[in-house]
Image (cartoon, rainbow, N blue to C red):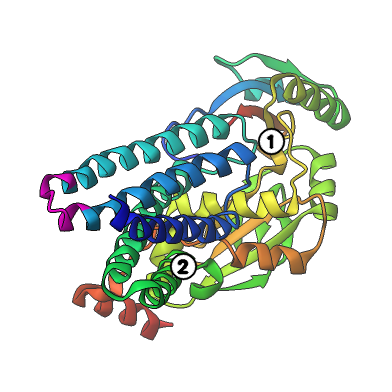
């Protein structure tokens, strides 16, 4: 065992560092709580240890020890369901819901990150076994960089143009440019919305983006992100201030209405742009021939 | 707004025009625009619901 100890330590250490690095990326889309931090770091450590032990097990040779990895996979699927359950519970009490699509995306991300940690420690321990410390360092850094780039993901700002829009009332119907949002019956509320409300228009850059923001889960995620970052004046007895994202059925552009605590249009634009594109919402109709025909046909008509 | 369970219900109707409305939900009669606005607001606050104006003298109060 002793002769393999440095290998295992190298692998475990790199894997844990990888988890730590990816944890930083998480917090962009995840209001943190310290215990969540500890949970994920510990699980990351376990994943790293499992990945690192695989190489000595093969060299021993104790091939059956590799079945460990299968056990680990089951374990991490559990991580996903724990994460999902926690977030779903929290979402029940949320005034502006995160939405099940967003939750599923986060949960899946956490599972995938553990696999990446395992991969990192496995590759590092192989490198250590073959080329000692310098090779391990190189491979470790490379895989961490790879894992990080994989996790960065697209944002709404990448696929759509986000511009300020006019918030106005057509009689009692609240409008964002030419998209109708909802009707507001009380005059007092209408005046307050005009005074404190903000609106942006999210214009898809291509038919792929249009299909993505057509997704209701994606729109809930945009409204949620904007509400978390900007604050929202909504309360249980003021449903009028619920941020709403509705689309223009003809162009596919989405109008977002929100009554933020801080009325800062610039900040709202940034908040909307940094909303992650959800995996479940991302779609690529342009990858198919039919989609390409439909997409370009529609554009030519304009 | 959440997809899936749609749970919209008209909880009450506030009107200036009694012969326009009838039926299931509780109906409140108001004598003036101000009174209608006030009644609608109180009911909505009590029920955590939202007021929608049908623009014919009648407001409905809906839980979303």
Instruction: Please say if A105 is above or below A269.
Output: above
Q: Are marks 1 and 2 in contact (CB under 8 Å)?
A: no
- Name the residue at 63% across, 40% down: A33
* Residue A91 located left or right of residue A134: right
Q: CA distance from mark 1 to mark 2?
A: 39 Å
Query: Front-most of A61 and A186?
Result: A61
**Percent coordinates x, y for residue A78 in the rendering:** 34, 36
- Residue B10 visible in the displayed image: yes
Identify the chain of the residue marked 1, using the numbered disc in the image.
Answer: A
Q: Residue at x 53, y 52 (%)?
A: A221
Q: Give me the chain letter of mark 2.
A: A
Is disc 1 placed on a helix, strand or loop?
helix
Q: Decide: few, some or many residues near mark 1? Use Cα within 10 Å; few <14, some 14-19, many ≥20.
A: some
Q: Which mark is residue A115?
A: none
Pick the front one: B17 or A25: A25
Query: What residue would you read off at disc 2?
Result: A148
Q: Residue at x 41, y 36 (%)?
A: B4
Q: Position of residue A263 (x, y in %)?
A: 82, 58
Q: Residue at x 75, y 19 (%)?
A: B46
* Left or right of A102 on screen, residue A65: left
Please say whether residue A246 is one of the residues in the magenta stretch: no
From what the image shows, is residue A161 above or below residue A119?
below
Q: Is residue A123 or residue A163 the one in the foreground?
A: A123
* Helix, strand or loop status at disc 2: helix
Q: Which range of residues does the magenta coloring cover? A: A57-65
Question: Looking at the image, is A285 positioned above or below residue A115?
Answer: below
Among numbered discs 1 and 2, the one appearing first in the sequence: 2
Q: Which label is found at residue A239? A: 1
């Amino acid at each position: 065992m002793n002769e393999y100890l440095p290998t295992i330590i190298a692998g475990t250490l790199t894997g844990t560092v990888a988890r730590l690095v990816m944890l930083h990326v998480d917090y962009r889309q995840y209001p943190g709580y310290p215990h969540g931090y500890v949970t994920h770091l510990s699980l990351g450590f376990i994943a790293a240890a499992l990945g690192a032990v695989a190489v000595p097990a093969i060299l021993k040779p104790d091939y059956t020890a590799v079945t460990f990895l299968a056990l680990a996979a089951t374990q991490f699927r559990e991580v996903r369901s724990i994460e999902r359950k926690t977030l779903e519970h929290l979402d029940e009490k949320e005034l502006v819901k995160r939405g099940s699509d967003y939750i599923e995306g986060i949960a899946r991300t956490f599972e995938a990150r553990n696999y990446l940690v395992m991969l990192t420690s496995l590759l590092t321990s192989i490198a250590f076994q073959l080329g000692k410390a310098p090779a391990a360092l190189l491979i470790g850094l490379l895989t961490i960089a790879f894992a990080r780039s994989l996790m960065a993901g697209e944002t709404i700002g990448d696929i759509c143009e986000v511009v300020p829009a006019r918030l106005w009332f057509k009689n009692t119907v609240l409008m964002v440019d030419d998209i109708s949002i909802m009707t507001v019956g009380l005059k007092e509320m209408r005046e307050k919305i005009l005074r404190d409300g903000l609106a942006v228009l999210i214009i898809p850059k291509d038919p792929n983006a249009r299909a993505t923001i057509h997704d209701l889960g994606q729109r809930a995620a945009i409204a949620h992100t904007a509400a978390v970052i900007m604050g929202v004046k909504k309360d249980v007895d003021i449903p009028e201030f619920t941020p709403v994202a509705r689309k223009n059925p003809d162009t596919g552009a989405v109008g977002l209405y929100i009554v933020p605590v801080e009325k800062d249009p610039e900040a709202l634009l940034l908040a909307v742009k940094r909303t992650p594109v959800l995996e479940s919402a991302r779609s690529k109709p342009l990858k198919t021939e039919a989609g390409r025909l439909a997409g370009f046909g529609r554009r030519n008509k304009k | 707004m959440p997809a899936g369970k749609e749970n919209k219900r008209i909880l009450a109707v506030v009107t200036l025009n009694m012969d326009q409305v009838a039926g299931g939900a509780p109906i409140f009669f108001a004598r003036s625009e101000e009174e209608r606005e006030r009644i609608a607001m109180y009911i909505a606050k009590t029920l955590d619901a939202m007021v929608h104006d049908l623009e014919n003298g009648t407001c409905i109060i809906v839980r979303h």
